[in-house]
Amino acid sequence: MEIEIKPNDVMIVFRPMGVEDGAWDGNYSIAISAIGPLTLSEDDVGKLISSAMMTAACTKLLETDNELVERAAKHCEESFGNMEEAIAIPINVYDKGHSLSKDTETVGGMQ
């Protein structure tokens, strides 16, 4: 799977928190970012960001609703394949030409 970040992309970033000595405690923050330059209308960008916000908000539901977790896991596997195999990170995900930093311009300011 090749990931290429392009203008007008809206991304949901899961950032691990509570990492100590290479061990993660399972906590994370979620950020939504729009990649510029934005060539879509403000209304269309808003629609994409709203969709990303709805998707990101589902993570809290998955923490509290076991039936939803089972349905989502089944749908995920049907859509994307075995979730255990999904942890293999493609080499080009970390392409230096597409890295985000605190200076990356986004809708609403910087990262």
Image: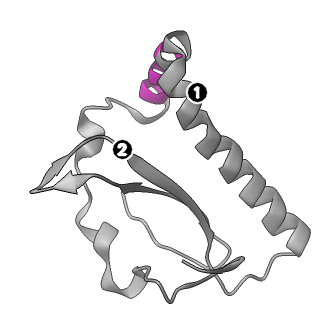
Mark 1 surroundings within 10 Å by alpha-carbon count, few (fewer than 14), some (14 through 19), many (20 or more):
few
- Numbered circle sitting on residue 61: 1
Q: Main secondary structure of the magenta part?
A: helix
- Residue 40's image quarter? bottom right
The type of residue carrying mark 2 is Asn
Look at the image and give the residue range highlighted in magenta.
70-78
User: Going by the image, does 2 lie left or right of 29?
Assistant: left
- Numbered circle sitting on residue 73: none
Q: Position of residue 81 (x, y in %)?
A: 37, 31
- First reached walking from the N terminus: tag 2 or tag 1: 2
Q: Across the whole image, how many numbered discs are drawn on residues? A: 2
- Numbered circle sitting on residue 27: 2
Q: Position of residue 79 (x, y in %)?
A: 49, 31
Q: Position of residue 2 (x, y in %)?
A: 38, 64
Q: Is residue 74 magenta?
A: yes
- The answer to whether any part of residue 13 appears in the image is yes
In the image, residue 107 sits, relative to residue 78, either above or below, namely: below
Q: Residue at x 82, y 57 (%)?
A: 47
Q: Position of residue 5 (x, y in %)?
A: 50, 74
Element class at badge 2:
loop
Q: Point out the residue furthest to the top here.
A: 67
User: Going by the image, does 12 lie left or right of 99?
Assistant: right
